[in-house]
Image (cartoon, rainbow, N blue to C red):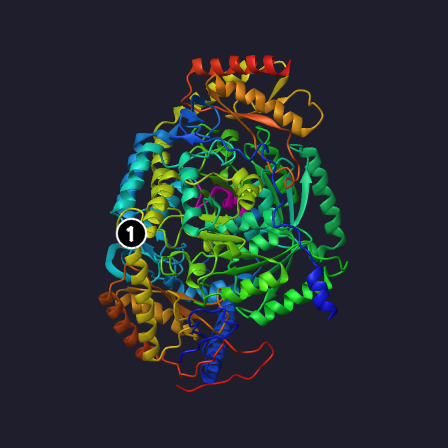
């Protein structure tokens, strides 16, 4: 009888708490038409400085016609996971092409960029293993680490001394318990070009640490693939490192390749394991063939025109210079990084107010024809929440006048809003 | 055998679901088979270690030989010795649209499946009983494909931004309104990947201090989402309502495990159709329980949307229930709509909350525009809004195909699991050798089937799974049935002794089965 009463009395929380109507993330910008160089946001035509379309391939006619041909041959969806009649010859071709381009043995494709690294990490690192990860790692890496149930050790962003300290501590731990140490795997997870801060990781030092302390390196190259390096092969080409030294490179195709999905590449010994234990690979439908065909064509264009990377870098340098010296906003990111952040020099106390202030700057720019966006984060879920910022993205399609216009507009906006 | 259930009049139509018990002899032989394979596995590993036999799998780099080994030897035992022998039944590459008939690239292996080479020939017109093409929308011509082509030339293939930043196109808004109308809910939100829809939104809805009650046989995406959320997870027996009720009662009465504080909320995770069993969730009873104990229901209609119900609106319509009773209706666009992606539908507050706090909205790229257009066209077709009756006709064709196919297979004497109305038809094989043999024999006869074994199913219950489609004509089904009959005789697969266990009235703790002869 008591039980009946308890059941009657119990009141659960509502399924979701109510969201205030003016929450900044609730009202999306509506883009009518394709999100290309000239973009129509909320009815206003602007120059696009917010989509990660680094090589301008989103509107490329050759890419679109390759996708059309694939659409006529295969339809849209694949109706099955890779294991059950969902493997098409386009997938196999794309995997071969990616492996050849990156000069590794094998590559594996996922149908969703976020799921790529979030499925790759738990396939290798299990409960009891140790992962050293940078503080500024992106959310997908954090979710992958959470799913893997391993011990996570964060080191300060790009601080090799801090990482070495942690590795030394781990070494002394190992000596106390050599049996356990012989079976715990160790990994370092870093990004080539960090999404949250716009700078690159010091890869040569990491390789030295790898061989000194016997840890494997997983490199996440979503932003640096197709941007860094002479031929666009990413940060390994940028630093001139042998690609076999990196155990796993993971990237998503949603930035430079202007398609959807992601891939991992590396030696067959490592990549083949994901075909049976990568959750996002085995239990999910494969990539629609038209997107795979678009990615293949984008790779072709990247291989045929290696000078676009130089052009992109020159533009990045130009705008980086032009944006220096804006009163109230500071530029965060390397000079050759195509995705920069503009943060407030002085915060006005609370994150909410900072966000509102930046929104006014963004609105000013949007009204005058430059489309910008704030970098969005899930505030409660991130491990190390970056400060609020405006995201500035540079693409090869932007002309020098447009870059200059954007810089001067941002100066004006900062003047009028922040002073 | 027809059972009309009288559970308080909750069911408006007969619910015929049965799982025939494994025959004893077959179970013993299956264990023996696995035992022999394991022994041989140890022998081969021994020979490989002592270099008597060549080791053909990839190995670690020379420079990294003194690192901690990446894989434990035992982890890969199953992979090396059992999976490798029948590996050619999976990952079969195709080179045409995955419709009712498909073209497959021929591949051979000269070293017992360690490597494959493509001969370059294409095997044409294989009857496809493996793709999830329930309503036949996987087409390379037709209204859907033309609309998608137009949108592709206008918008391009990718989006290059997240929903919350610059990736929210007008097409996405159109799609979400349409999906909400189709399901009969207030509002909906679409995501780029079905797997990710579950694994990224369940953590946004529940957290620490909440309880998740999930079915035994839930899909990996639901399990991952539940784990990532940090809530306590309790599992109830597959489709067993007494087990669920017991867990609910215990949870509310006793509260959280150590602190005894009351739970913040309770979420029940179930699927519409379970893809490995072919069973349909007992939705009327689940909803009754949910209302009685004030918990929330998350329904994953990955396989049932478009495939069940007189107008294809899923398992809620199949049972004649109100969509507003289900708190979170989730589904995927990959199966019945011939596209890719997933959606969540529900009340406006829920969707607004997800727009703000879902991991996918903030960090993952939005859906590709031609895929969105394919979904819009196919949903309109199913609803009949494009002016034709193709949608209705397909839903009916699928239901007829399902009933016909299941009836014929049962008559032949195979053991078929699951509900009479589910288009997923598992045919039991049990023995490991028959898994490979069935797949290969059917391919020789030009029929493509899917076989599944451990770890997707319990170790002795390996099966072949047929996915019916509205695109299958009666001739195709008859051909397939004839071949299945032949192969069944050849491999001695007709195990059924027609002793069906009435699952409906079985109480929770009973260990003896009531058997009724036909």
Please say whether residue B123 is one of the residues in the magenta stretch: no
Residue B451, image quadrant: bottom left
Q: Which residue is tagged 1? A: B97
The image quadrant where one finds the C terminus of chain A is top right
Q: Is residue B69 above or below residue A398?
A: below
Please say whether residue A107 is one of the residues in the magenta stretch: yes
At x 67%, y 32%, the residue is A159
Left or right, B257 with respect to A247, comes to right
Disc 1 packing (10 Å; few <14; some 14–19; many ≥20):
many
Q: Nearer the viewer, residue B246 or A200?
A: B246
Q: Nearer the viewer, residue B340 or B330?
A: B330
Q: Which residues lie in the magenta part?
A: A104-118
**Residue B14, percent from left and from top:** 42, 72
**Residue A129, percent from left and from top:** 64, 52
Give the structural element (helix, strand or loop) at label 1.
Answer: loop
Left or right, B487 with respect to A170, comes to left
At x 44%, y 60%, the residue is B315
Left or right, B306 with respect to A166, comes to left
Left or right, B19 with respect to A192, comes to left
Q: Nearer the viewer, residue B310 or B506?
A: B310
Q: Is residue A252 above or below residue A334?
A: below
């Amino acid at each position: 009888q008591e039980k009946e009463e308890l059941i009657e009395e119990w009141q659960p929380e509502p399924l979701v708490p109510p969201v205030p109507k003016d929450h900044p993330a609730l009202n999306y910008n509506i883009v009518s038409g394709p999100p290309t160089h000239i973009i129509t946001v909320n009815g206003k035509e602007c120059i696009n400085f917010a989509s990660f379309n680094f090589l301008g391939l989103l509107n490329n006619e050759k890419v679109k016609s390759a996708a059309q041909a694939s659409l006529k041959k295969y339809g849209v969806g694949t109706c099955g996971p890779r294991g059950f009649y969902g493997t098409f010859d386009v997938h196999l071709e794309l995997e071969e092409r990616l492996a050849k381009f990156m000069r590794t043995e094998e590559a594996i494709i996922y149908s969703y960029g976020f799921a790529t690294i979030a499925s790759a990490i738990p396939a290798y690192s299990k409960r009891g293993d140790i992962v050293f990860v940078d503080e500024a790692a992106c959310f997908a890496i954090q979710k992958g680490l959470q799913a893997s149930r391993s011990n996570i050790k964060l080191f300060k962003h790009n601080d090799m001394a801090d990482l070495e300290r942690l590795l030394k501590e781990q070494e002394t731990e190992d000596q106390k318990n050599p049996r356990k140490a012989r079976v715990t795997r160790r990994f370092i997870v870093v990004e080539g070009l960090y999404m949250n801060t716009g700078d690159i990781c010091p890869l040569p030092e990491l390789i030295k640490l790898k061989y000194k302390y016997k840890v494997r390196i997983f490199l996440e190259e979503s932003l640096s693939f197709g941007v860094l390096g002479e031929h666009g092969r990413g940060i390994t080409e940028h630093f001139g490192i042998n690609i076999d030294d990196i155990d796993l490179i993971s990237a998503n195709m949603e930035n430079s390749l202007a398609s959807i999905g992601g891939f991992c590449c590396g030696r067959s010994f490592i990549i083949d394991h994901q075909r049976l234990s990568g959750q996002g690979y085995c239990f999910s439908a494969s990539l629609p063939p038209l997107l795979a065909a678009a990615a293949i064509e984008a790779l072709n264009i990247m291989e045929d025109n290696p000078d676009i990377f130089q052009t992109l870098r020159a533009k990045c340098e130009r705008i980086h210079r032009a944006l220096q010296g804006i009163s109230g906003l500071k530029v965060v990111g390397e000079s050759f990084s195509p995705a920069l952040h503009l943060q407030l020099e002085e915060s006005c106390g609370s994150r909410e107010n900072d966000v509102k202030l930046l929104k006014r700057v963004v609105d000013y720019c949007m009204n005058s024809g430059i489309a910008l966006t704030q970098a969005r984060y899930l505030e409660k879920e991130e491990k190390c929440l970056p400060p609020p910022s405006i995201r500035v993205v540079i693409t090869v399609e932007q002309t020098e006048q447009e870059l200059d216009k954007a810089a001067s507009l941002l100066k004006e906006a900062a003047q009028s809003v922040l002073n | 055998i027809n059972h009309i259930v009288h559970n308080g009049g909750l069911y408006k139509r007969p619910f015929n679901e049965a799982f025939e018990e494994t025959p004893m002899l077959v179970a013993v032989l299956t264990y023996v088979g696995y035992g022999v394979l394991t022994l041989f596995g140890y022998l081969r590993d021994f020979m490989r270690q002592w270099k008597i036999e060549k080791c053909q799998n990839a190995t670690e780099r020379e420079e990294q030989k003194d690192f901690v080994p990446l894989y434990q030897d035992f982890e890969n035992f199953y992979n090396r010795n059992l999976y490798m022998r029948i590996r050619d039944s999976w990952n079969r590459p195709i080179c045409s649209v995955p419709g009712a008939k498909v073209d497959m690239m021929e591949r051979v292996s000269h070293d017992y499946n360690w490597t494959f080479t493509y001969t370059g020939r294409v095997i044409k017109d294989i009857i496809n009983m493996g793709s999830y093409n329930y309503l036949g929308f996987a087409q390379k011509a037709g209204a859907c494909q033309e609309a998608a082509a137009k949108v592709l030339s206008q918008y391009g293939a990718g989006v290059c931004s997240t929903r919350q930043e610059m990736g929210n196109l007008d097409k996405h808004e159109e799609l979400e309104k349409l999906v909400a109308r189709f399901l009969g809910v207030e509002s909906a939100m679409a995501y780029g990947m079905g797997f990710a829809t579950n694994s990224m939104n369940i953590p946004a809805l529940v957290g620490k201090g909440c309880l998740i009650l999930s079915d035994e046989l839930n899909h990996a995406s639901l399990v991952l989402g539940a784990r990532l959320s940090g809530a306590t997870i309790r599992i109830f027996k597959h489709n067993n309502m007494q087990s669920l009720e017991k867990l609910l009662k215990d949870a509310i009465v006793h509260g959280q495990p150590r602190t005894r504080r009351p739970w913040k909320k309770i979420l029940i995770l179930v699927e519409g159709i379970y893809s490995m069993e072919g069973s349909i969730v007992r939705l009327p009873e689940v909803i009754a329980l949910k209302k009685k104990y004030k918990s929330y229901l998350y329904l994953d209609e990955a396989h049932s949307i478009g495939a069940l119900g007189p107008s294809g609106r899923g398992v809620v319509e199949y049972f004649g229930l109100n969509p507003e009773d289900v708190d979170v209706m989730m589904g995927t666009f990959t199966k019945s709509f011939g596209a890719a992606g997933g959606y969540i539908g529900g009340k406006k507050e829920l969707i607004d909350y997800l727009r703000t706090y879902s991991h996918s909205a903030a960090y993952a790229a939005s859906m590709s525009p031609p895929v969105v257009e394919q979904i819009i066209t196919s949903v309109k077709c199913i609803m009949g809004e494009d002016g034709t009756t193709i949608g209705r006709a397909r839903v009916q064709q699928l239901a007829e195909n399902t009933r016909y196919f299941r009836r014929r297979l049962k008559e032949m004497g195979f053991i078929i699991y699951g509900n009479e109305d589910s288009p997923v038809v598992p045919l039991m094989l049990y023995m490991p050798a028959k898994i490979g043999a069935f797949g290969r024999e059917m391919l020789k006869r030009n029929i493509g089937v899917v076989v599944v074994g451990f770890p997707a199913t319990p170790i002795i219950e390996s099966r072949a799974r047929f996915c019916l489609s509205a695109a299958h004509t009666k001739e195709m089904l008859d051909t397939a049935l004839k071949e299945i009959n032949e192969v069944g005789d050849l491999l001695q697969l007709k195990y059924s002794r027609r002793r069906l266990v009435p699952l409906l009235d079985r109480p929770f703790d009973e260990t003896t089965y009531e058997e009724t002869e036909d």
